Image (cartoon, grey):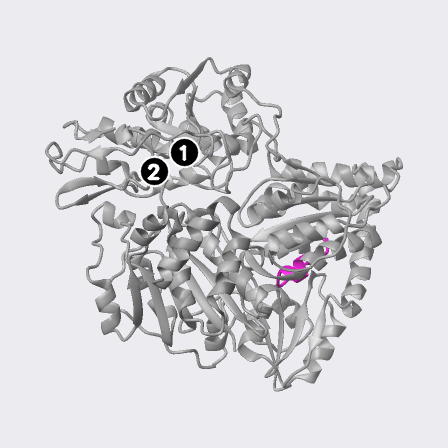
Amino acid sequence: MKQLMLGNKALARGLYEAGCCVVSSYPGTPSTEVTEEAAKYDEIYCEWAPNEKVAMEVAFGASLAGKRSFCGMKHVGLNVAADPLFTCSYTGVNAGFVICVADDAGMHSSQNEQDSRHHAVAAKVPMLEPSDSAEAYQFAKLAFEISEQFDTPVIIKMCTRVAHSQSVVETGERVEQKTVPYQKNIAKYVMMPGNAIRRHPVVEERMRKLTEYAETNAVNRVEMGDTALGVITSSTSYQYTKEVFGERASILKLGMVNPLPRKLILDFAAKVEKLVIVEELDPIIENHCRQLGLTVTGKDVLPIEGEFSQNLIAEKLGLAVPESKKLDEAVPGRPPVMCAGCPHRGLFYTLAKNKCTVLGDIGCYTLGAVAPLSAMEMTLCMGASISATHGFNKALGKEGEGKTVAVIGDSTFMHSGMTGLANIAYNQSNSTVVILDNSITGMTGHQQNPTTGYNIKGDPAGKIDLEALCRAMGFSRVVVVDPYDLAECDRVIKEELAAGEASVIISRRPCALLKYVKHNPPLKVEEDKCVGCKSCMRLGCPAISVRGGKAVIDTTLCVGCGVCQQMCKFDALKA
Amino acid sequence: MTKNIMIVGVGGQGSLLASKLLGHLLLTEGYDVKVSEVHGMSQRGGSVVTYVRFGEKVYSPVIDKGEADFIVSFEKLEAARYVEYLKKDGWIVTNTQEIDPMPVITGAAKYPENLVEKMGEAGVQVDAMDCLSLAEEAGSAKAVNIVLMGRLSKYFDTIPAEKWRQAIRECVPEKYVELNLKAFALGRGE
């Protein structure tokens, strides 16, 4: 059936039809929907793992057991999973093993815009790169075939514009795969030096064979048009190139970006007068072409940073772009904000009020850094809040310990905050850690995690008790606060920062967007009482604005959390 | 020739249903269609954009500056923000609702006045209406998206209104069909 499908959903459909049996992933924009969609098929066992490293190892284990398996993650997640990746390249697979990594050029929802192709090159594993939903669907199936034919994990690299664009897909039926019997093979699967030394040449030989495959397989294709200009491209850059040039250029469209073909590129180059490489982020195809001795145009005119588009390519290659209208008016920006009723707000307000140095982490609460709260001073990667706070305090001693706070979400804590906390328990700094427990993985769109008590399908699952976990690590000061209660938050923050030992504060209240969370009626402003002091505005709640010198509540946004009421000295905000 | 519709608004306003409806309708009409969305951080009250492109064969999933035949906007400031994306003879179809962005809430910036008039003065064709009132009249403030679709449908001579209504029936949960059909009619001025 012909249907419009999100790239991620199409990839999930490909996994399903390829007979994939086990999926383990960690959510991350723009990769999340692959696993959410796969979980809708009863034939596939799906789970959210605590982090990408665990997910990849789970999927590897399933492959070892003889079932086609998959794990998905965003680009920075592949850094976390790089350890198993580099060595399962050596072991190879039993049944097909496919990894999806979704890059985020343009950083729509990421802390950097690294190019994941480097991982494929460095780990010496093949990488496929679809350019639309139909290819995401086809490449998922092809990836399993390559994985089994060449005894290798295969990476499918998505990007925001392929993952989150819908285009037409024609689907088929699932083909069940026979379980590949597991056979004990210590030389292949136990990567200690004596064995790994023998596996490395196997990896090199595999790359040679994969290069031959890349020379002739239809995954890479030539579309001859006008030969004055030849373009080598892949992924969404192919779509922009076609949009700009149509038949006015010849195109070598690469579906496999590691390893890259040699003869195919040289033959193509020989047929065109000028050769341009159109690739987002780093010049990987370009450098390969230069190594082949070709003269090419690439990053000398096209940017390394950010996303491409049709106009960008046209302009940089000297073509006209459409005229556009301009408005002679400063349009204020609209950055993302913490939602009305967000439980993180009260806690961040308290931290800002106490002039704490807040080292933060990855999640919705990263928005604590945004004005007017401006209550976070560092965000690096998953889990870094806790470990960096320990380092900060070790460097500054008492000067840091009395005011430095690590802030981390429940899911991020399970992902890689626990190890940082173990370090504080072990190496003993007087650090204060706040776990913002909103009972869900928020930013990526509400995925369950090991602290929520539910699995990916919403069924009851194991639930890790954060208080018990922290106590078991040796923290005697473990306090739970309700972030809607500003006075209590203030008391606890002051008390724990003053304490002579490390402590964990669990700021607990479910995300206001969760369906089961009951909202109170929106608050009203009593105009005669409001003096326009703007105290309530210091919370940065999107439901409150000031019009005509008085506070106004947007009743479509307000969930009646009551935090602003606690800010008002004039009792002007009423339920 | 590829046609381009941009849907812009504030994260959480319901632009995903509008693009789902358009995608479904245009695919049924036999076009090649691409719809591009952005998920993640910007959905938290930020400025959000969805691109809908259709034609015989569509390549790029995004709409660039000077390319949009229509900009359908859920909020006035967002319409103004994307004026540059409009084609020379394109139309902006916008809700007149104002939602203050954080820089306005904190007092760092002012919400510009008379935006519809200013867009008109800049030579932009603007079709502005109070979609929120019409949505409330239809039965829910959340139906702003379908009110806008009703208005947009007036610009498509080749696709009969009944086809749009059929797409609504196929895209909306059954219990909300009636409400949305009413919102659609109000958007069309029927």
On what subunit does the disc labeled 2 rest?
Answer: A
Are the residues at dot 1 and dot 2 in contact (C-beta closer than 8 Å)?
Answer: yes
Earlier residue among tags 1 and 2: 2
Q: Position of residue A237 (x, y in %)?
A: 57, 67
Residue A383's x, y, as percent? 51, 34
At 80% across and 45% down in the image, what residue appears?
Answer: A93
Q: Residue at x 48, y 58 (%)?
A: B19
Q: Is residue B26 visible?
A: yes
Query: Which residue carries the number 2 mark?
Result: A340
Query: Could you say which disc has been placed on residue A512 in the image?
Result: 1
Inter-mark Cα distance, 1 to 2: 8 Å
Which quarter of the figure has residue A163? bottom right
* Image quarter in which the C terminus of chain A is found: top left
| Relative to A81, residue B155 above or below | below
Nearer the observer, A424 or A180: A180
Residue A170, magenta (yes or no): no
The residue segment tinted magenta is A124-136
Query: Taking A484 as reference, is B118 above or below it?
Result: below
Relative depth, front residue between B34 and B190: B190
- Residue B67 figure quarter: bottom left
